[in-house]
Image (cartoon, rainbow, N blue to C red):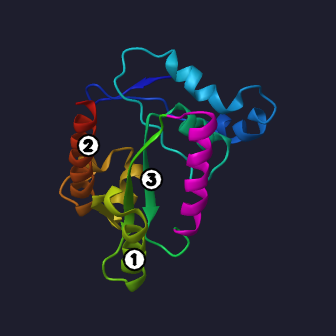
Amino acid sequence: AIVRTQWKGVSLLPSTIDLAGAEVELASVISRETRLRRRLSGLSGYDVAIVDCPPSLGMLTINALAASDRLIIPIQCEYYALEGVGQLSRTISLIRESLNPNLAVDGVLLTMFDSRTRLANEVANEVRRQFGPIVFKTVIPRNVKLSEAPSHASPICYYEPSSTGAQAYGELGKEVSALWLKAER
């Protein structure tokens, strides 16, 4: 069920424990890859729907990619992060070929970045080398307040607005808004 929030113009459609079995249940469903797209097309009164996907390329993520117009790829600045990028790129190509030819990659977002570590800097440099101009200028830092905010059922911009994490997400919002406005022209 859609849940209205305390923030004007923002509603949530949270997952429930029932979603845990969705991968198995969808295995035998006809047109399983487009189930989310069909459900979202029935909604009205919304300008944007943001779908937060699990860090896997299972049926739930396939559904989200098939239903989406635009895609932001978050990459954690950690050791194994780059390994999944190649598979994601192949999956995006397959989605475009068979389910959603208009899927656009808006950008790649570096997350959990700790500038003090060599590894984070190496991963960030490699991502920039591989993806070039589509890497967002904004980088989301590793930040304690970002980790705490969900346990307080509050977005970081309300939980700790002066934190580096909140400021980074604010900058990302500006960057994405500018990108979308430019795309509409």
Measuring 71% from the left and 30% from the top, which residue is drawn there?
Answer: 32
How many numbered markers are drawn? 3
Q: Quadrant of residue 146?
A: bottom left
Relative height, residue 167 to residue 178 (above, below)? below
Relative height, residue 24 to residue 172 (above, below)? above
Locate residue 119, reporting x and y percent.
Answer: 43, 81
Measuring 51% from the left and 23% from the top, which residue is drawn there?
Answer: 40
**Magenta part of the chain:** 82-101
Single out the mark in the foreground, 2 or 3.
2
Residue 26 relative to residue 67: left or right: right
* Amino acid type indicated by mark 1: Ala
Residue 52 relative to residue 113: left or right: right
Locate residue 98, reporting x and y percent.
Answer: 64, 35
Name which of mark 3 and mark 1 comes first in the sequence: 3
* Amino acid type indicated by mark 3: Ile
Name which of mark 1 and mark 2 comes first in the sequence: 1
Q: Which residue is identified by label 2?
A: 179
Label 2 SS: helix
Alpha carbons under labels 3 and 1: distance apart: 17 Å
- Circle 3 residues within 10 Å: few <14, some 14–19, many ≥20: some
Q: Which residue is identified by label 1?
A: 120
Q: Which mark is residue 148?
A: none
- Circle 2 residues within 10 Å: few <14, some 14–19, many ≥20: few
- Circle 1 residues within 10 Å: few <14, some 14–19, many ≥20: many
Q: Which residue is identified by label 3?
A: 73
